[in-house]
Image (tube, helix red, strand yellow):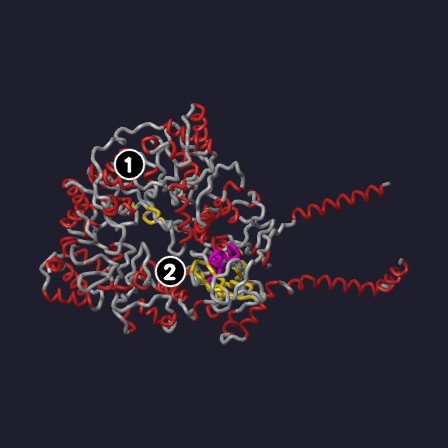
Amino acid sequence: MIRHFSTIAAVVIAVLATSLATSCSRKTESAPPLKPTAFGAAIIESSGGKQFAQIGALLQQPVVVQVNDEQGAAVVGALVEFAAPTGVTFDPTSGLTDSSGQVTTNVSLGGMAGRYQLVASTIDKSHKKVELKIEEIALGYQQTLGRRLNDQYCERCHNPESTVERVSNYDNLEIKPHPFTEGDTLNKLNDADLTAIVTHGGPALNKSALMPAWGNTLSKSDIEALISYIRAVSDPPSRQAGPVYTEN
Amino acid sequence: MRQIFASLWQRLFGDSGRAFGVVSVIFLASLAIAPAKNFFSEWRHYQHGYLKTIRNRSEANSLQRHFKPGIQQIWLPELAVVDRCTSCHVGLKEQSITDVSTQPFRTHPAIPHKLDQFGCTICHRGQGAATTVSEAHDSTLAWEQPILPAKYIESSCGECHRGPLPGTPVLNQGRTLLSRYGCVNCHMVKLPDGSTLKASDNPPSLSHISDKTTREWIYAWLKDPQAYSVSATMPNFKLSDDDARDISAFLIANSTAVPGDSDSLSAKPAADPSAGPSLYGESFCASCHAVQNAAGNVVGGDVGPELTRIGSKVKPEWLQSWLRDPRVYDPGTAMPHYRFNDPQVATLSGFLLSKTDSDLLANVHLDATTPDQIAHGKRLVSDYGCASCHEIAGIKKPENFAPELSRIGSKSITQLIFLPGMQHTLPDYLAGKIKQPRAFSPNLRMPQYAFTTAQIDALTTALLALNERSTTLPASLAVAGAPESDYQPAGKAGKLMADLACFSCHRINGHGSDMAPDLTWEGSSVQREWLVQFFKNPGTLRPALIRRMPRFNLSDSEVNELTDYMMTVYQNPSVDRDSMPLSGYSQGEVELGKQLFYGKYSCQGCHILDTKTDKGYIGPTLTHVGSRLTAAWIFKWMKNPQALRAGTAEPNRAMTDEDARALTAFLISQKGRANSEVAKK
């Protein structure tokens, strides 16, 4: 009798434990996979590449990619999936191309400064993966500080683009300054040269006096921060731009 | 079975020698467990990995020399920090391995603090004393602080730094949002220095609301504030139709009239249809007010409310009275008293009233109110804490309406209720709560805000900085922000400046806004006659700016009052106005100054001195500078502009006295005559 009773008790405990375990385990509900209704031949970037944002932050503009067929016409209903190194998040991570053949996603960058390589991929008719690589730039503390100094002191001459709030002075200058993204030129200057130009003005390297000396306005660490910002945003990338994070 | 056991026993412990040997072996094996555990530990594995990574690098020798094997520890008793993170994160201080992207070997990016002085967990959170990855990074039952995600890292700066920092834009934005969106109207936030965070959203008083607008508009606004204005700071309380009906009934019934704010106007608007828009433009209304354009972008300032659909909101008589003198309806408004004449008021109000949206009130049909509705509306106004933000006659501002947030950054997660599927961390909870408060319970009173993701991250960052450590920090470690100034000018001029709302754009003695130049030293800077003319007819000083000084239509006596006050009071002690003359410099000095201006210092890159040749757009135009500025100010400015106006973009060129004097001589000779000659030609 006692043995019988203990068997029942054991069964009850086992059932309870199993149900507890199943109810406590985290459910990983994933959305049903999207079914493509069409297949493209190529995937291209529409907008949103080469942006810079602070580490961990949402990029200001979404990333938009487009799927085209062999003739270069937009494909509607093709599946696009986004992948990236750890830390990067997409919203959404995949999608079907809309009526203009595009998929839009909002991207937050990872927690370390450097370049993040995002991969957008679609499947073509023969079920082969077609990939597009997009690079985005995450700014660390020093570069963020440099970006602020750039906004305050440099950008109005060095950025040819005007915005509603800030009219560019670039076109007014006889000798054109180099935009900080102009890697072809700026990567050839080493840190000492850049520091000299910022500190003592253009004439320090036999360049135009329209570039004033900032050495008495900016501190040494300010100038270091500014240079780290210039290195981070240059295109093509500088050797000092830090590592490129790719999906493993 | 029993036999096998017996023979095994016999074999192992049969005689004393055997037994001793076997026990010794067991004993030795169990002794080896601890060293083995140590030997196979995670940190040792990572240290091996690090050595392997650096082995083939050119600077392997120096890296090897810096490497210290074994558990490393940063111990800071004053901060209660015991951080062993550097046991695995071995390369943190190595500047030569910046290209290594694999963790845990990355170099720490440059920051203003030394790792040895602050450790790791002060900024990154996590469990510093742990020596395994999961214990250090994740939260456990005994340790609730997981690693702080990078997007919130600036919150840690805010534990010690109480003011805004140039390197923490997210934290600064979050702190501003707490005030700007009136969070602190309901949630008290006591700052570590004992002060209370003040709101800066300036919600309007509702005591006289029926003068201003209709019950239908209030209803539509309550149902969805962002439908009226996408940039509205007012949140959505998700009210039912009946609740919105009753609150609007109560507010109208409760409203009392303000004498003189609904006077009808006899003047007619100007016949020219472009007169309205051009008066709007000339008065620089867009410096403070935004309008949504056809593309959906909100263009303009955010000091005053958006005006896209203003014609569907305000009563014409009220708007006209408001434009005539806004201080009749709201004595504390940030809007200046423009002193428009009646035809101008008619023209401007006509233009504004044409900005309507027929969809806004199309479906709002309200029957006459009943006393029950008004009573219910009054109860709802109390329940939702409307009076926390708005002044409402007969309803007291509730105290401690919502939970205090002074230490929210240390809230234990066992006290929080998470939504299903949500990560169980404090930052995720805070961000989720700000994003969708009613998702946590439909009965919550906290309304739905229209924050962007970036704003939510910024708010979360600011809230995480309000924690136990920030309040208990040793005073020696806290870095105070700039104290808030409540400077108010005195006397008649002070009253005039309040009426003109100078501080809505300008800063003086630390008080006011950054939109327009700081006027703290204006009396040392400009010549009296110029200031008089500028008040009467503000000309363009900076051609690239879209926000400029409007014309207030001041009377001569008002102009004199203001000018006298500013010339006398806003004096910089280091600038003696009379120390340098406004004329009489030698031709040689003027010529040298010109050479310096166009050559050595190339000022034409940013300034226009000769409109024929110069194009610089950044600094003010200098064609008339000799009639505008004092010579002593120019000289001092040349020597060190930041000493006179902190943060100005004019670089400090560390000029010699000779150069500065020559440039002063040249600039003071620019009285504007050359310009009028050009005009004649």
Question: Mark 2 belongs to which subunit?
Answer: A
Q: Residue A196 in the image: state x and y as whole percent.
A: 32, 70
Residue at far top of view: B371
Question: In the depicted view, which residue is nearer to us: B246 or A22?
Answer: B246
Look at the image and tell me in which quarter the C terminus of chain A lies: bottom right
Whether residue A141 sits left or right of residue B275 in the image: it is right
| Span shown in magenta | A89-115
The answer to whether residue B229 of the structure is visible from this angle is yes
Question: In the depicted view, which residue is nearer to us: B520 or A248?
Answer: A248
Q: Residue A152 in the image: state x and y as whole percent.
A: 32, 58
Check the image and report above or below for B20 versus B374: below
Check the image and report above or below for B122 versus B7: above
Check the image and report above or below for B427 versus B199: below
Task: Using the numbered discs, state the Cα–Cα distance from disc 2 to disc 1 in whole angstroms.
Answer: 43 Å
Q: Residue B389 in the image: state x and y as whole percent.
A: 39, 36
Q: Which amino acid does label 2 sit on?
A: Arg
Q: Comparing marks 2 and 1, which lies closer to the viewer?
A: 1
Q: Residue A138 in the image: state x and y as whole percent.
A: 45, 61
Question: In the depicted view, which residue is nearer to us: B596 or A106?
Answer: A106
Whether residue B377 sits left or right of residue B661 in the image: it is right
- Crowding around mark 1 (Cα neighbors within 10 Å: few <14, some 14 to 19, many 20+) is many
Check the image and report above or below for B236 versus B533: above
Q: Is mark 2 on a helix, strand or loop?
A: helix
The answer to whether residue B195 of the structure is visible from this angle is no
Asked if residue A39 is among those painted magenta in the image, a careful observer would answer no
Label 1 belongs to which residue?
Answer: B319
Q: Tell me the number on the disc at residue A147.
A: 2
Q: How many labels does the image show?
A: 2
Question: Mark 1 belongs to which subunit?
Answer: B
- Crowding around mark 2 (Cα neighbors within 10 Å: few <14, some 14 to 19, many 20+) is many
